[in-house]
Amino acid sequence: MSVRAVRGATQLVSDTREEMLDRVAEMVTEVMGANRLDVDDFISVIFTATSDLVAEFPAYAARQLGFGEVPLLCARELEIDGSMPRVVRMLAHVESELPRSEITHVYLHGAAALRTDLTRVRSMPDE
C-alpha cells in the first residue's frame, strides 16, 4: 500500500452554508469514487477556500460524510489578483494501491478551468 496525494477543487455559485456543504460533499465523494477510496483510506485532508467564502468550514462537509477520525484542516487560499472566486480546494493524503499515474484529480464546476493540463479533469454543468 502506498501513500498518494489526491487533488480536488470546486467552485460555488454563492457563499451559502448549504452550497458549501453540497459542493464540498460532492467533491469529496467524486474523489472517493474516481479513486476507489473509502473513508478509512484517508490519512489527512487539507481544504483551502478563497477569502470570499465565509458561510461554513469546508471540513464540516467531510465530517458529515464520516470523516470524524480523519485529521482535517481548513486554510485560506492566497489572494492573487485575477484568481478565480468562490473556490474550495482539497489536498488529500490517502493509502492506495493505485500507481501515481492512475490517481484521478477531480475538478468540478468552474474549477475545472484551473487544471486543464490534467487529462482526467471532471467538469459538471452548473444548475
Image (tube, grey):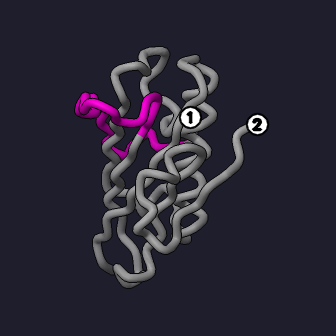
Residue for badge 2: 127
Q: Nearer the viewer, residue 47 or 72?
A: 47
Camera-side residue of 36 and 115: 115
Task: Please state if 66 lies on the left or on the right of 125 as rendered.
Answer: left
The local crowd at label 2, few if under 14, some if 14 to 19, many if 20 or more residues have their Cα within 10 Å, is few
Q: Which class describes the residues within 10 Å of circle 1: few (<14), some (14-19), or many (20+)?
A: few
Q: Residue furthest right?
A: 127
Position of residue 93 relative to residue 58, above or below, is below
Q: From the image, which quarter does the C terminus lie in?
A: top right
Provide the residue span drawn in magenta.
66-88
Q: Are marks 2 and 1 in contact (CB under 8 Å)?
A: no
Where residue 39 sits in the image (x, y, percent)? 49, 55
Residue type beneath disc 2: Glu
- Residue lying furthest front: 82
What secondary structure prevails in the magenta region?
loop
Q: Which quarter shows the N terminus?
A: bottom left
Q: Residue at x 56, y 31 (%)?
A: 12
Q: Which residue is mark 1?
A: 64
Tell me if residue 70 comes above or below residue 22 in the rendering: below
Across and down, in percent, residue 92 comes to: 35, 55
Q: Is residue 49 magenta?
A: no
